[in-house]
Amino acid sequence: MRCVIFDLDGTLADTSGDLIASANYCFNSLGYGDVLDPVSDAGTALRGGRAMLNLGFARIKPDYDQTDVDAQYPVLLQAYGDAINVHTKLYDGAVEGVEALKTAGYAVGVCTNKPSGLAETLLKKLGVRDLFGSMIGADTLPVRKPDPAPYIAAVEQAGGDVKMSYLVGDTITDRKTAEAADVPCALVTFGPDGQAVSALKPEALLHSYTDLMQVTKELIG
């Protein structure tokens, strides 16, 4: 079966506001106030909790080291889990686009570097978990993207054929994952990096979910 696998953060949903809030919870608890900005730091937010903590500590504590990050990471995860769906929004047309693929006979799934428990919770709260035949998170396997194994697992769990699949994502991690799995990649231009993702030379650019079916047919038929 032909198959389309989606990244989650920055691809299906803009999760940056809630991610930034969880990092700022850590910095507030340390007495630094809101160190990260939900708009200008959105790109870093979608690269994960450790990326946000590293950015924040670099601003407030130039001599920080990874022990600072390690100490706050579980605090961040707890804060995020407690308020995972306050600001998060699915991108316009995402649900309709995925539903159209399923109606047309494509398998669909999710492959994310978000911890699987948090990813499952978020998809359920957004009301879309049942749309996807697979959900592979950062800790589902011993490795994570850009290793190809999570992507391959997501395709197979969804009932798809890797040779007739492609990945929809928003970052260089997704680009490298697709390359490692030897499949095409479409990068969205409505995420935090915008048109800059074109520099990664994906097989396709997805400017809107209204274009998803057309892009899918072009990439895997």
Image (cartoon, rainbow, N blue to C red):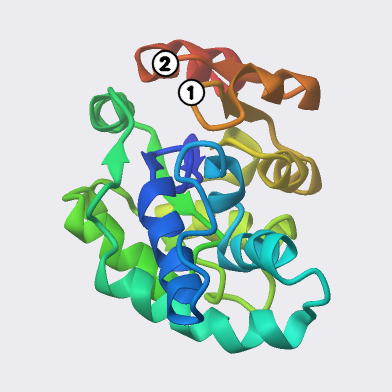
Kindly identify the residue that appears in the image at 62 percent across and 56 percent down: 152
Circle 2 Cα neighbour tier, 10 Å, few/some/many (<14 / 14–19 / ≥20)? some
| Quadrant of res 195 | top right
Mark yes or no: residue 70 visible.
yes
Describe the element under mark 2 as helix, strand or loop: loop
Query: Quick one: 181 or 21, which is closer to the camera?
Result: 21
Q: Does residue 15 appear left or right of residue 59 in this picture?
A: left
Amino acid type, callout 1: Phe
Which one is in front in this view, the residue at disc 2 or the one at disc 1?
1
Amino acid type, callout 2: Ser
Q: Does residue 68 appear left or right of residue 18 in this picture?
A: right
Choose the circle earlier in sequence order: 2 or 1: 1
- Looking at the image, how many numbered discs can be counted on the residues? 2
Query: Quick one: 24 or 51, which is closer to the camera?
Result: 24
Q: Name the outermost residue toward the right.
A: 63
Q: In this view, does 165 lie above or below 206?
A: below
- Indicate the position of residue 15 as horizontal and vertical percent values: 39, 48
Q: Is residue 159 above or below residue 172?
A: below
Mark yes or no: residue 134 visible.
no
Q: Does residue 159 appear left or right of residue 146 in this picture?
A: left
- Evaluate if marks 2 and 1 touch, with contact meaning CB atoms under 8 Å apart: yes
Describe the element under mark 1 as helix, strand or loop: loop
> Which residue carries the number 2 mark?
208
Residue 113 disc label: none
Circle 1 Cα neighbour tier, 10 Å, few/some/many (<14 / 14–19 / ≥20)? many
- Indicate the position of residue 221 as horizontal and vertical percent values: 53, 18
Kindly identify the residue that appears in the image at 32 percent across and 73 percent down: 81
Kindly identify the residue that appears in the image at 38 percent across and 20 percent down: 209
> Which residue carries the number 1 mark?
190
Measure how far apart labels 2 and 1 are at the Cα level. Answer: 7 Å
- Indicate the position of residue 26 as horizontal and vertical percent values: 47, 75
